[in-house]
Every structure is written in structure tokens, then in C-alpha cells.
Image: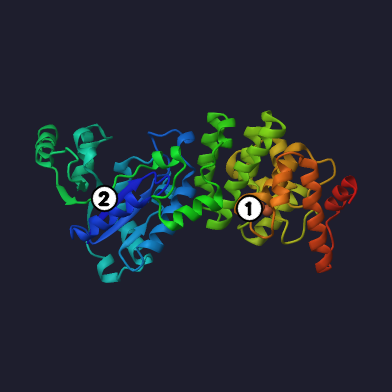
Amino acid sequence: MNIGLLGGSFDPFHKGHETLIDGALKSGIVDAVIVIPSGRNPFKSGRTVSAAPYRFFMAKNAVEEDFKGRNVFVSDIELTYAGTSFTLTTIKEISKVSYIRTFLKANGVKESQADENHSFFWISGSDILPTFEKWHKADEIVKIAGLLIASRPGDGVDIDEQTERLENIFGFVPDIEVFEIDGIEVASSDMRSKNDFSDAPKTVREFIKTHDLYPVSNPLDLVSDETVEKFNEDAIKLYRFLGEKRLLHTLNVGILSVRYAGIYDKNLCDRALIAGELHDCAKELDEHQQMEMAYERAGDTFTEKKIVHSPAGAVMAQREFDVTDPGILDAITYHTTGRGNMTLLDKIVYLADKLEPSRTYADLSKERELALTDIDAALKLCVKSVKKKFDSRGQQIHLLTVDLMNELGI
Ligand SMILES: [Fe+2]
Ligand SMILES: [Fe+2]
């Protein structure tokens, strides 16, 4: 097969990307397109781009909805590959026979087709050509993949002239194929700065809303560069351990925790981000493993299936994510039960877990509002509803939660 590769940040994925994919397929030059959201982008700092799992799932959901039944797939290779995402390394990794055949089959391509020898094309707008030689190892890129260039009428790039120019630089004729597209140019950065997502597909607009992905005031502005980097790196690592829903939930909890820390104690912002992000990291490990880790952290204090992931999470945060801060480890340990004498960080993570934007288990508007002005009152309200839920099911309340209830006068 001829396979087009479309890499990018996709922050957010938008209709311009869809026009490119559609144009590439209709040109007949490629039989399939693989969309590759970037992982660790060497040219964008962590602050300017949303954590990789957000961008990956946003693109995946949109492609699955809008290209149903067509050969368009989304690859997570940049989330599973250990290094920095240079175009060359990505093309090398994806074109490996062992990867591409398995990937295509997993995406429903017939075995006979998936097992063919494939040719690869890097899809892009014509604007890359005038400076393409400056890309990291540009000559090597065009040795293993052609360039599939979308040309817009009046875009001012003369493809023949550029091909000749690149030939003079590289010493060989690069394979440059062209297809025409029309339609408006859309830029993700404009959409974000104008806070106008009308040029994004419906699934993307819903995704942005569900996760409050581009808030007007971004809590991450309160966090140091170093911690934002750690947050992004941990987010990529968490992809190995958690499914879509829970992974996005934990990232949301990290960010909401920063928002609360920004209100109650700015010095806690960095720690709140990491504690929130990792609070559920152990939840999808096998149960036996969770039990063992919970015992290691807290002896017999946590034994129930639903809550062992919290002390287990503290152990995992230490082992897998190099967290040593005792306050962060405590906030993770007690995020399910709470405890007497909760620290501010404990309270922040406990509340953010219950109130992050994708939570829809009840009408939380009152709790959400209160959490922005009076954290103890919000805590009381949340613990009250926990009590109500337990009472209605006739379930016993954990002793640590009883301590907290006594303290709050519930
Ligand atoms: Fe949890
Ligand atoms: Fe959670």
C-alpha cells in the first residue's frame, strides 16, 4: 500500500486536518492515511502544547467518527516510543515491518494487504518546502518517505522550483507528489487564542468542552516549567497503565488541583499538579498487585477492592514516577477515604477527584462553585453526599472517613 503519514500536535485536531486527509485519499496517491499526534515535541515547550494523551484521544475520536469505513487510522507510536519525536525517528519506527503490519491488521486492514511492502509519504502543506532542508536530517527523511504536498491555489509556492532547489541541496531528486485542495486555512493556535472552535469537528468540540481543555485562565501558568515538563512526561507514561477515560480523568484532576492550589496556597501549585495527576495511577494494575502495594504502604488500613488503589498509587508514584515528596504521597494515599486532620493538599486532591470537569455522576454545580471560595465547606458537602450514598446502600463507612466526618461535624 501507499501510506500517507500526517504528523502534528493536533492541539486541537480541526477541519483543516480533515481536508488534508480527505484530499490525500482522493488524490489516489495514497491508499491509507495514518494520523500521528506528537508525543515529546522537540520544538514546542510543554507549556504551549496540551499533554499528549489529550491530543491523541481527541484526534482518535474525531477520525473514528468522521472517517468511518475509510482507511484513516490514528497511531499512538509517539506515546509508546521512548525518545523525542523527530519526524525521521517517527517514520523509521512506523515503517518497521513488525510495527506497520500489526498496526494495520489491528485497525481492520485485510491481512493480505497489511502484509504487503508499503511505501510511505509524509503529508504536509506546501509551506514546508521553502525551508524543508532545515528539518532534522531532512535528506534522510526523503530517502525513506516521499513528500505528499497539498497545494492550495494561490499559495505562492512553485513546486517544480522547490523540487529543483532541494535536488541541488540533497544531490538527488526527492520524491515529491502533489495534490490540490481548496477550502479555508485553519490554524490550531488561532482557534486557541480566539477561543473559537467552530472550525473543529463536532467530536473535538465536545471533547474540549468535556475536559475544559482550553480554559480562559490556564492553571498551568501557575506551575514551574520543570513541573509542567514532568506532568507531560508522566502523562505519556500513564498511557501505558490507564485506559482513555481514567487517564484523561487523572490529568483533569491534576489541572483542577492546581486551580484550587492557586486559590488557597500558591506555593502548593507544583505539588498539587503531580499529586492530582498520579492519584489513580495504580487503579488498573491487577488486583493482587494493588493489594500487595497497599499493604506495603499502609498495612491493613486499606483492604477493600475499591480503595486499595489509593495507597497502591503512592507506592507506584514512588517506583514508577520518582515521587519522594511525603505530602504528595499522602494526598494520593488518602484520596479515596479522606482522613482526620487532612492537609490542604489532601483536601485539594480529594475535591478535584470528585469535581474535575468530565465528572457527570451527579449535578455538581453547587460543590464546584463552593470549591472555588470555601474549600472546607465544599469538602463537607462532598463528604455528606458520600455518607448518603453509603447509607443508602447499607455499606460501612471506612474508619478514616468516620474520623473526617466527626471533625466536620457530619
Ligand atoms: Fe481513585
Ligand atoms: Fe480518581
Report x, y in % for residue 92.
29, 47
Q: Which residue is mark 1?
A: 282
Sequence-wise, the earlier of marks 2 and 1 is: 2
Q: Quadrant of residue 393?
A: bottom right
Nearest the camera: 360 or 50?
A: 360
Residue at the image point whose x is 37% and y is 65% from the top? 107
Report x, y in % for residue 268.
68, 32
In the image, 315: left or right of 114? right
Report x, y in % for residue 269.
64, 33
Which label sits in the foreground, 2 or 1? 2
Q: Amino acid at mark 2?
A: Gly
Check residue 183 in the rendering and tell me which mark sits there, or answer none: 2
Whether 248 is drawn above or below 262: the answer is: below
Measure the C-alpha gap from mark 2 to mark 1: 46 Å
Residue at the image point whose x is 44% and y is 44% from the top? 196
Residue at the image point whose x is 37% and y is 62% from the top? 66
